[in-house]
Image: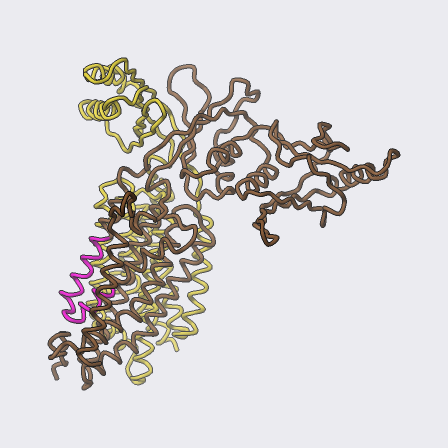
Amino acid sequence: MSKGKSITLLSIISVLVAFLLVMTFIRFPIGVKNYNSVLGAINLDYDVEGGTAYNLTLASDNEEEVEDINEIIDTLEYRLDALGYSLYSVKAVKSTAEGVKDYDIRVETKSTDTLSSDIGVVAAHGEVKLYGGTSANPTTEILEDVDAIKDSQYLGSVSDGETTYYQVSISFTDDGYDALHELIHAASESEEGSTSYYLEIKLGETVLLSGSNAISESDFTNKTLNVYLSSEAGAKQMALQIRTGGLAYKYDISDPMEISSPYGDNVATKAVIVIGAVVAIIMIAFVLMFKGLGLIGALSMILFILGETLMLIAVPGLVVSMGGIVGILLSTVITAIGCVYLLNNIKIEFMNSEKTVLAAVKKGFKDALIPTINGGVVAGIISVLLVAFTSGLAKGFAITFGIGVAVGLITNLLFTRMFSALILPLASDKEKFLNLKRAVK
Amino acid sequence: MSCGLFKKIKIFFIIALVLLVAGFTMFGVFGFNQPIDYKSSYEVQVSVDQKAGNTTTVLKDAADEYFSETGIKVLNYATQSIDDGMVVIYKFNSNVTEDVAGLKEYIQAKLDAESNVSNVSADVVVNESIGNNSSSIGKLLIALGIAVALIFVYSLIMNKLAGAVSVIFASVLSGVMFVAIVALTRIPAAPFFAFSCALSIIVSSVLSVVLTSKYKVFVKNYDKMPSSEIIETVYNKSLRNYIFVGGIVLVSALALCAFMLPYAMFAGAQVLVAGLCGISSAIFATPFMWSLIKKSK
């Protein structure tokens, strides 16, 4: 590549990178509004930016004495998992004052639009009961002596073109289905003429499945009734409550309280500073160790951190927790390690052969290709499996680490090569610039 | 195998054996050390019923001063903001009910002394707390077990049997060394244990895969070179890389400690241990197993 072309391309890339750096990290006012930067758009989890807490206190009209508080904690944690909360804290607290024997429960998690109703669902009290009859919103309890419902699952969204619905499947046991089938059949064969049958499912006083629409035998497939709701949160809540029922004990739910991060103050700001400092140290170490070659590596690291940051908002639904922050930091480390391996390869290739600088650089990249991909694949396998099998901090770590490893692979295989092709034509003495030496014979 | 590298490998395995025995004994007797939020503990809730003026700042400062003057060690704290006030929750290992007997009066006196607030009431409640007790160790072991199997198959395809066995041996050794060292040094395990353990395996397997790829290149290009000479040559050529990797891991661990937050420091300590286990396993266990298998053929 000619010198002029290199300078032109480097200038264009520099302007582009500078623009992206400003848009990623700097906040500034635009007219009456504020631009909050890409960093400001990253969704943070409750352990980084704080969230909302609710206190659950045993109601004065609670009838049963709490036997095992750990079982309640486990149940609440299971339900929060089922509703999609990846990070939360559920603690039982009891005053040390004399005479206090009941535990309160404190639930802390990320603030969401549906948190208030979700907590209501998680802490709901009572049993799931079925009501049926030939008029809408029936009040007659049915199937009291039968264990009627086997399972209830949220199946996802379905669309009829214009409107999106959220599907819940309610599976009945054999006995439950047979008994319900008899009731529906009886209604359709009644002496007064064929009448519709209405089914309502309630948890305590809360209506889970509204009895305003009639059901028939054709609504069932393999003893499963599919129901369609207009809100995703509502569908998930219904599926959970029908499946697990209510708590055996009645709790009053406090008003929401805003809480700070359990890890301390300004966690997000400190994370940005620390990761920035680590990247700066890596870049300085590159230049000190490898001189001109290190400059190529350092420039690639800038693109890596830009790419990683942009991916944090590009991946839908990604929420960054403390585990995610550690994942970003460690994927930066792994990328730096890969870059060092690559640059060292070039040095060793030049040292041990009679090749020209450009030929050594080309061979060095070629020889490093397979080991770099190998390392990326291994790290990727572990990340994918951690995402699939774990939850909470470990999952958060695996997601950002996996994204970082992928971006790092592209950085090391593509951007480093690009910068070497652009920068080398500018150096009059390439050996001196790249600090390459032949082996002493 | 040459004397220099062989000696180092011998020392590594002796140290690893001592750490494994000591660490797993400690684990068997005491289990892991858990931080305050993940075990039964005590908390002191100090609260005010107003947000006017600098009430909330006075509340926290007064409580911090009291604990400092009376020598009570606070392990962590969190704040809760309510519509008509604020609660600060301080966390302790032991029951401090008697130690904080004068806290309420102390805070109230400080609040009363503030000229820009009036009729502010402070309250102090000491609670016993049962922490988060859910554990994901089972799922972690499943994920890592499947990962090790898949990595073995991948290494088998890329680097043949010697390479694959070496990678798996080094990765598993790294993982168990990490567990042993965390148990021995009493670094708080939760909540970062899962991914730190995964990290030790990741570092070890990535470095081992790269190492065995290099061995494969040497075997291909210098088929008469003995395996001991191959691993010695690769070790000498890669030493600078290992030092750099170790340095970067240390910088990352220090970076986490630079948060100056307890949990970040736990994460930093675990990252350092995980990194060192991964690097040392890759440097010493991989060539040992690789040359062993090559010689047995």
A184 over B238 or under it: above or below: above
Residue at 32% across / 84% down in the picture? B223
Q: Tell me the quarter of the picture where residue B52 sits.
A: top left
Does the image show residue A430?
Answer: yes
Which residue lies at the image location 40% right of the left edge and 68% below the top edge? B165
Q: For this rendering, which residue is in front, B248 or A31?
A: A31
Instruction: Establish if A358 lies above or below B188.
Output: below
| Quarter of the rendering occupied by the N terminus of chain A | bottom left
Main secondary structure along the magenta-highlighted residues: helix
Q: Is residue A40 left or right of residue A274?
A: right
Chain assigned brown: A
Q: State which quarter of the image contains the C terminus of chain A.
A: bottom left
The x, y position of residue A371, in whole percent, is 33, 72
**Rendered location of residue A192, percent (x, y):** 87, 33
Display colour for chain B = yellow
Q: Position of residue A184 (x, y in %)?
A: 78, 39
Q: Nearer the viewer, residue A106 or A266?
A: A266
Q: Nearer the viewer, residue B228 or A166?
A: A166
Left or right of residue B287: residue A133: right
At a point 60% along the width and 39% down the height, the residue shown is A243
The residue range painted magenta reads A276-300
Q: How is the image coloured?
A: by chain
A192 relative position to B81: left or right: right
Question: Quick check: is A320 in the magenta stretch?
Answer: no
Q: Residue furthest right?
A: A191
| Residue B141 sits above or below residue B208 on the image | above
Viewer-proximal residue among A161 and A282:
A161
Q: Residue furthest front?
A: A31
How many marks on residues? 0
Q: Where in the figure is residue A304, as x and y percent of width and height?
A: 28, 62
